[in-house]
Amino acid sequence: MPSADLEARIAAALGSPVNSLHPMGGGCVADVRRGQLGDGRNIVVKWGGRSLALESRMLERLRKAGMPVPEVYHAEDDMLVMSWIEHGGPIDRDAEENAADLIAHLHNQTAARFGYEEDTVIGGLHQPNPETTSWLDFFRDHRLLYMANEALLAGRLSGETYDRIETLAGRLDNWIDGDIKPSLVHGDLWGGNVLALPGRIVALVDPAIYYADAEIELAFSTLFNTFGERFFSRYEEYRPLAPGFFKERCELYNLYPLLVHVRLFGGSYANTVAGTLSRFGC
């Protein structure tokens, strides 16, 4: 869409002319731009993607759970206009503690079943969320095997590796306890989706929410070093981790985001998945 047409569409939706609109980096799912309206509001606009109205609903669910998120000014399936959140710099030690306060509170939000009231997306990929009583069944069928099959169909995962994942899927009860309570998770907790200023977290963005074993979120945060020891020490003041998380389940749960990356990018991520399977004897 030409910039002038986009500006006209934003102005019509928000009732204010667009003074400026500039491209931002990082928009792999949709075009992302930062701008200012004539009424003084600073905005971020996503457009041209899919499921942006869904993203708005996920942000609202996080807001209701007490999480800091951008304010949504307007949402359609192919356009999302939100408030700009000032942020910058690394997540420092105090911000890690603040993140632990927030994420522990989020994980205390529970439900009767795993999954969610609707399917969501992760990295622009469909993420099925059928409400399921057993976490082991949900993780096996709707995370591990589902995304492995998507990567296989895309030609980015070999049949041999898929067979090894099936073998692991049949043994999950060796590592995953059957007595797990559903927790609301952000679902895509890498550093780019955690906006911070010195000493605090100012927003969580680009969610992929559902109800899960909270440990899958904690595992994800280790995959790209989102948080460090200060975060986990503080988190455990609220929600102590069961034995075996760092030794086994962390790596097991990270197979899901790794498979998302295999489906999206292929390459070395498939080798990392194969290495994890070897460490679990598959």
Image: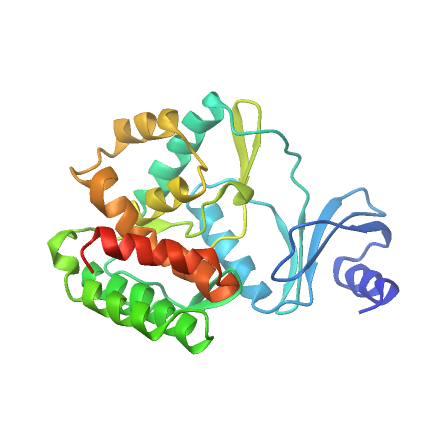
x, y percentage for residue 121? 47, 64
x, y percentage for residue 23? 77, 52
Q: If the image is split into quadrants, where does the N terminus sit?
A: bottom right
Q: How many marks?
A: 0
Occupied quadrant, residue 137: bottom left
Residue 211 visible? The answer is no
Visual colour scheme: rainbow
Q: Residue furthest bottom?
A: 153
x, y percentage for residue 108? 30, 42
Occupied quadrant, residue 170: bottom left
Q: If the image is split into quadrants, where does the C terminus sit?
A: bottom left
In-front residue for pair 253/41:
253
In-front residue for pair 234/25:
25
Using residue 35 as the reference point, say whether residue 85 is left or right of it.
left
- Image vertical order of residue 155 relative to residue 87, above or below: below
- Image vertical order of residue 231 relative to residue 254, above or below: above
Using residue 116 as the reference point, say whether residue 83 is left or right of it.
right
Residue at 64% in and 67% down:
49
Residue at 31% in and 53% down:
275
x, y percentage for residue 113? 24, 61
Residue at 60% in and 69% down:
50
Using residue 264 as the reference point, say whether residue 133 is left or right of it.
left
Residue 84 visible? The answer is yes
In-front residue for pair 141/150:
150
Residue at 85% in and 47% down:
38
Occupied quadrant, residue 270: bottom left
